[in-house]
Image (spheres, helix red, strand yellow):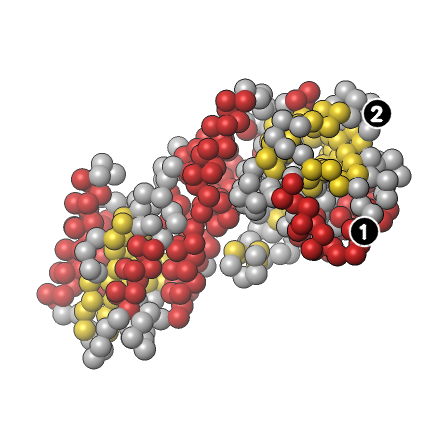
Amino acid sequence: MAIVEVKSGVYWVGAVDWNVRHFHGVTYTTHRGTTYNAYLVVGDKYRALVDTVYEPFTDVLVAHLEALGALENLDYVVVNHVEMDHSGALPRIKELSPQAKIYCSPRAVEPIKKHFGSRTDGWDITTVKTGDELDLGGKTIRFIEAPMLHWPDSMFSYIPEEKLLLPNDAFGQHLASSQRFDDEVENSILMDEAAKYYANILLPFNSLVERKLKEIAEMGIEIDTIAPSHGIIWRRDPGQIITAYQKWSTGVETPGRLSPDAVVVFDTMYGSTEKMAEVITEELAILGYRVNLYNIGKSDYSDIIREILEAKAVVVGSPTLNNGILHSMSPLLDALKGLKPKGKIGAAFGSHGWRGGAVSQIAGSLAEGGIEVIGDGLAIPWIPSDDELQECRNLARELDKVLKAKGQ
């Protein structure tokens, strides 16, 4: 893709990955691809590269830097985050620009050396903390540590002269596009991918996100553009994504989107648990809730997590197999245990043969993920009768009572 001037003297020199469909192994589906954003900051005296790209796209980054005449004159490389999709090209950049000094957070030094081994011998690495600055002459890079957003080494870079924030993995999306800015793409797609990104990557760090947003506000820094390391750059209205992060970090639905009030997720063997799921969903809808129903065996669980991000209730069902849940349900429950979404009410249900076990396992997993589970769950033997399907409706009504009591 073409080099783009983001702000005066600041250039996008990254790469677009149109074909990636999974991130972090297979845990996060990227239906719309992604980008690896790197930025060249050109001052009157010095040039700094902020972040690099995933190693397979090194040649794209190198070609962009060569086109700007920057490789032989590169003075600094800022490593906001060591994860390989951001720093994979670092050894090659250092090979071509051996004079470039590396700036990173104190907690980035060890992973840099562990990832790149002997290739780091002789590298000039300077560690920086919040408030430290790098003067490029007419352009300043101010550093803001952001540990656990989403690695311990993470930090933001801010260019006060341009009111430009380069926050690495914060405020990003996995979205490949021939365009670079938010006013050039469909906003509903952009915000949906931003929400999915938050739900699958930053959700476990809600309290840290909330705290960091407050800290940045208290610092009084002006921001009119946010250029993350994945996806689209926010220049039309950076406040939109900041507001969304404030909402998501506190478990509140973002304005302007009709998110589901409840997400019902199930799997089934011979249709019994599916019948239960359908009746629960129907009753919640009758009670006035927006409900999304997912068969986990036919759905993408990282998409489901995106829906759970703004939902009030999470209802999960599985038949019993070997005294526990179906294996298809494990990735979702394991993810929820790690992600720990805020302020959700949960319920468990399922069918079983001569012996149960799945419902109690679901309830335990939801509780482990910080979800408030109502009751002991609903376990029905064999095929649900009409009276037992009424119990499914009663479960939905009990969920309604709890939600209303909490003002949700």
**Label 2: few (<14), some (14–19) or many (≥20) C-alpha neighbours in 10 Å:** few
Q: Establish if 397 lies above or below 211.
A: below
Identify the residue under disc 1. Answer: 121
Residue drawn at point x = 16 percent, y = 45 percent: 401
Q: Nearer the viewer, mark 2 or mark 1?
A: 1
The amino acid marked with disc number 2 is Lys
Which quadrant would the N terminus be assigned to in this image? Answer: top right
Does 249 sit left or right of 133 as displayed? left
Identify the residue under disc 2. Answer: 45
Of the pair 323 and 383, the residue shown nearer to us: 323
Q: Is residue 264 something that shows in the picture?
A: no
Residue drawn at point x = 48 percent, y = 37 percent: 209
Question: Percent x, y for residue 4?
Answer: 73, 34
Does 237 sit left or right of 94 as displayed? left
Residue drawn at point x = 56 percent, y = 37 percent: 146
Question: Percent x, y for residue 187?
Answer: 52, 36
Does 42 sit left or right of 331 as displayed? right
Q: Establish if 216 lies above or below 345.
A: above
Question: Percent x, y for residue 327?
Answer: 39, 70
Which quadrant would the C terminus be assigned to in this image? Answer: top left
Residue 36's disc is none
Extreme residue in the left direction: 387
Q: Is residue 63 something that shows in the picture?
A: yes
The amino acid marked with disc number 1 is Asp
Say which quarter of the image contains residue 316.
Answer: bottom left
Of the pair 277 and 153, the residue shown nearer to us: 153
Q: Establish if 376 lies above or below 37.
A: below
Q: Establish if 244 lies above or below 202.
A: above
Question: Percent x, y for residue 3?
Answer: 76, 37
